[in-house]
Amino acid sequence: MVPDIPLSNGLTMPQLGLGVYLVSDVAVCEASVRTALADGYRLVDTAVLYRNERAVGRGIRSSDVPRDEIFVTTKVWPSDYGHDKTRASIAGSLERLDCGPIDLMLLHQPVGDVRGAWRAMEDAVGQGIVRSIAVSNFGVPDLEKLLPYVRIPPVVDQVELHPHWQQPDLLPYLSQHDIVPEAWYPLGHGSRTLLAEPVIAAAAVAHEKSAVQVILRWHMQRGFAAIPKSTDPAHIAANIDIFDFELTAGEMTAIDALGRDRAIFRPPRWAMSVVMPLMRARPLP
Ligand SMILES: NC(=O)c1ccc[n+]([C@@H]2O[C@H](COP(=O)([O-])OP(=O)(O)OC[C@H]3O[C@@H](n4cnc5c(N)ncnc54)[C@H](OP(=O)(O)O)[C@@H]3O)[C@@H](O)[C@H]2O)c1
């Protein structure tokens, strides 16, 4: 059973979920969501950018799990920032997902009219169409700009986070502001170097688990939420089979020591500001 993480707004969020980035085949996406829900997952993470919200919604509606047990996350892309555009983006996500209020809506990137977008997110909470609101890829300077302005603070910051990139500057700030760190690339995007780390391999042998399961267990014990992506039913099942063992303090310390000084995904800031708002030009499916 996946534990729930308390959020600063009094609600909770499952600590582990399924990510569907780059799952563009709608049948595969729908089947992966259904498989994950049958295996016990209760959180699905999509985004307007991933172009698969309809498939996620169909996977949810065709599963045997009641909707009120499922936590649906999606995101607004910077091309849709600004009060009116963000309001329209949220309405579009609601229509495509077609499964009632959205549990968690994120601003996907810290570029463009973030403040206008945040106001629309706050309005959506007031209207009851979104339950919790949050950010993604916001660093300390981005949060310092946003937080003084908010009426409803973000409950989560979804960022690249795994043993090779542990966000040394951001995590203390998030903890201070009661913002839950949620890991994207929790497996380093399947990085072979990460999976082959000797201390991870040794823990895997000791607990009769895989390297992937050890990494996900490390996320859980560090208190992070994590959304590993898989379309392989065996991997989807393995990734939630991590609640029957515990890494020792020594193993946790050894994995903590793998942190490097650079993220895997690190586009230059100018590229984020210039290119990201221009992406997602095609009409959504
Ligand atoms: N907010 C953002 O800007 C942002 C950015 C990137 C990602 N995300 C979110 O984070 C999610 C996860 O990120 P990600 O998909 O890029 O990286 P990831 O979850 O770290 O890694 C996914 C890779 O690991 C493989 N994998 C998964 N489980 C495995 C297992 N048990 N054994 C072996 N290989 C396994 C997958 O292949 P198979 O499919 O073959 O299992 C895939 O190649 C995304 O789906 C998305 O929801 C958010």
Image (cartoon, rainbow, N blue to C red):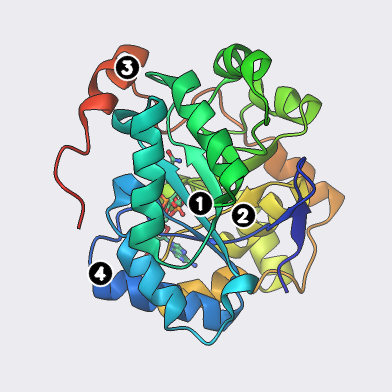
Which quadrant, please, contains the N terminus? bottom right
Residue 26's label in the rendered image is 4
Q: What kind of residue is marked 2?
A: Ile
For disc 1, the neighbor class at 10 Å (few under 14, some 14 to 19, many from 20) is: many
Q: Identify the residue shown where x is 40% and y is 68%.
A: 57
Badge 4 or badge 2: first in the primary sequence: 4
The label shown at residue 273 is 3
Q: Residue 85 appears at what percent x and percent y?
A: 33, 32
Q: Which residue is drawn at 70% across and 52% down?
A: 218
Q: Is mark 4 on a helix, strand or loop?
A: helix
Residue indicated by mark 2: 215
The location of residue 133, given as percent across then percent down, is 59, 40
Q: Is mark 1 on a helix, strand or loop?
A: loop
| Residue 278 x/y as whole percent | 21, 27
Q: Which numbered disc, 4 or 1, marks the residue that appears first in the sequence?
A: 4
Marks 3 and 4 sit apart, C-alpha to C-alpha, by 30 Å
Quarter where residue 143 is shown: top right
The local crowd at label 4, few if under 14, some if 14 to 19, many if 20 or more residues have their Cα within 10 Å, is: some
Pointer 1 residue Cβ closer than 8 Å to ligand 1 = yes
| First of labels 3, 4 by sequence position | 4
Cβ–Cβ under 8 Å for marks 1 and 2: yes
Q: Where is residue 172 in the image (x, y as percent from the top left)?
A: 75, 25
Q: How far apart are marks 2 and 3 (CA)?
A: 32 Å
In the rendered structure, which amino acid carries the disc numbered 4? Answer: Val
Label 1 and label 2: CA atoms lie apart by 7 Å
Quick check: marks 3 and 4 in contact, CB under 8 Å? no
Q: What amino acid type is highlighted by mark number 3?
A: Ser
Horizontal relation, residue 185 to residue 249: left or right = left
**Mark 3 Cβ and ligand 1 under 8 Å apart:** no
Q: Is residue 164 something that shows in the picture?
A: no
